[in-house]
Image (spheres, rainbow, N blue to C red):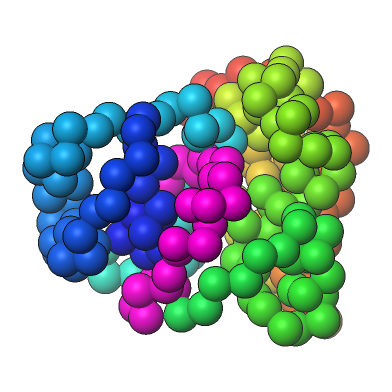
Amino acid sequence: AFEEAGAGLFDKKVVVGKEWRKKVHSDGKEYLKMMEEYGVKPDFGKMYYWCKFITPDVEAARVKKGGFETEFYVAVVDGETAKTLSCDRQETTELIWFTPQECLAAHAASLIYLPPPQWTIMTELAASVTSLQTLPSYSTSPSRALTRDHPIKPYLLGPSPEGVLTMAYPGDRLHPIYPTPTGTRRISIKKSGITMDCDLPPDTRIEMAKL
């Protein structure tokens, strides 16, 4: 979040020179040098691990780097810090403050586009986090086991005749790595938006398939 929006999330408040964002953009190791120069450390109390997404094989085949394995965190910033944020005009082009519900509504109205990972996260936040005060306990709750404890690598189930792209998430009976015997957990992507079909309890724990 630092190089894209300027959110440092440090253990103490400092004003970091703008040149550091460009340096970190070019080389992630510069972030460590920056923290050493300013005498700060990451404030992990402001960040809550949410889930891990792995690029689907069908998409990784089209990406020069071969796809990504990305951990997502939900972070809390105070109002004063929020006023200092700015987009980098590269990975971020506009900063808009939404509630999760507003974010999903904007996506549904085609005002913004949420890729499946962000759509999945916002959907869970909108349904289960009623306030910032409940975020810490919910993030580590056993009820999040299905999403938090199993890397989410969607697997293509094939486009339908209607042009809907359907992908299995861990827990779906057709998922090759983390299946359940009869479960359904999949997303459908179409021009009008994204929907999820899931009949698994959110606290489901899955054993890795024997390959």
Depicted 3 relative to depicted 38: above or below: below
Residue 123 seen in the current view: yes
Above or below, comparing residue 96 to residue 129 in the picture: below
**Residue 103 picture quarter:** bottom right
The image shows a total of numbered marks equal to: 0
**Looking at the image, residue 191 lies above or below residue 206:** below
How far across and down, in percent of the image, does residue 190 sit? Answer: 76, 76
Q: Position of residue 6 (x, y in %)?
A: 37, 59
Which of these two is toward me, 140 or 175? 140
On the picture, is 116 further left or further right than 32?
Answer: right
Residue in view at x 69 percent, y 59 percent: 119
Judge from the rendering whether residue 78 lies leftward or rightward of residue 60; answer left or right. right
Depth order, front residue of 91/97 = 97
What is the magenta range? 66-92
Position in image of residue 202 (x %, y %): 80, 28
- Asked if residue 195 lies in the magenta stretch, the reply is no
The residue nearer to you, when weighing 184 against 161, is: 184
* Residue at 20%, 60% in the rendered image: 17
Q: Residue at x 40, y 41 (%)?
A: 9
Q: Residue at x 46, y 80 (%)?
A: 93
Q: Quadrant of the N terminus?
A: bottom left
